[in-house]
Image (spheres, rainbow, N blue to C red):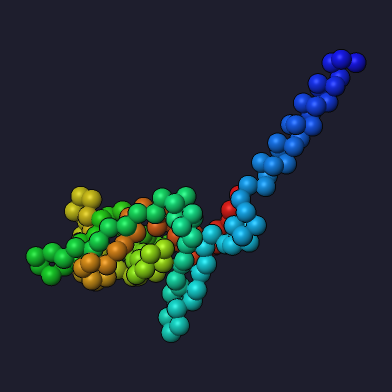
Amino acid sequence: MRHRIPLAVAVLIGVGMLVLAGCGGSADEAASEPATVEAIAGTDLSRVILTSKAAERLDIQTAQVRGSAKKRTVIPYSAVLYDPSGATWTYTSPKHLVFVRQDISVDRIDGDVAILSAGPPPGTAVVTVGAPEIWGVEYGGIKED
């Protein structure tokens, strides 16, 4: 009988720990979505808004569009997205945690940069890490574990 009490206590503690592990986060966190997608009036585009936690989990990183000497703009090649039809896009970030897909025309790729013939103006923030995930949010939603 001496061994059954510690075993029963161990089982109860283990079950309690499993129940508590499943409760992670507050009620407010559970109720809020990691991302929202809003249609932009007058366009076929959407605005993707991430929570700071979602942006951190996706490791979202941005860089600024640079202007070139020949009046062309330059973005990191990692900011270029190709859709299934071959059209090129990038995600801009007009505000912190807000992302909008913008069509671009790539003149050429030179190493790790894309030289654009059309796209966002110099100084615009473009997503260099996490853009495919934002695309997935825009078109398919995001689910938290």
Tell me what residue is drawn at x 31 percent, y 62 percent.
126
Tell me what residue is drawn at x 75 percent, y 31 percent.
13
Q: Position of residue 27 (x, y in %)?
A: 65, 57
Q: Is residue 21 visible?
A: yes
Q: Is residue 60 above or below residue 118?
A: above
Q: Is residue 102 above or below residue 109?
A: below
**118 on left or right of 130:** left
Q: Furthest residue to the bottom?
A: 42
Tell me what residue is drawn at x 34 percent, y 70 percent.
94
Q: Furthest residue to the left?
A: 69
Q: Position of residue 143 (x, y in %)?
A: 58, 56
Q: Nearer the viewer, residue 63 or 87?
A: 63
Q: Is residue 1 above or below residue 92?
A: above
> Count the marks: how many?
0
Tell me what residue is drawn at x 59 percent, y 57 percent.
29
**26 on left or right of 52:** right
**19 on left or right of 8:** left
The part of the image, by quadrant, that contains residue 66 is: bottom left
Q: Nearer the viewer, residue 130 or 31?
A: 31
Where the N terminus falls, by quadrant? top right
The part of the image, by quadrant, that contains residue 18 is: top right
Q: Position of residue 145 (x, y in %)?
A: 61, 49
Q: Is residue 139 visible?
A: no
Q: Position of residue 53 (x, y in %)?
A: 49, 54
**16 on left or right of 62:** right
Q: Furthest residue to the top?
A: 2
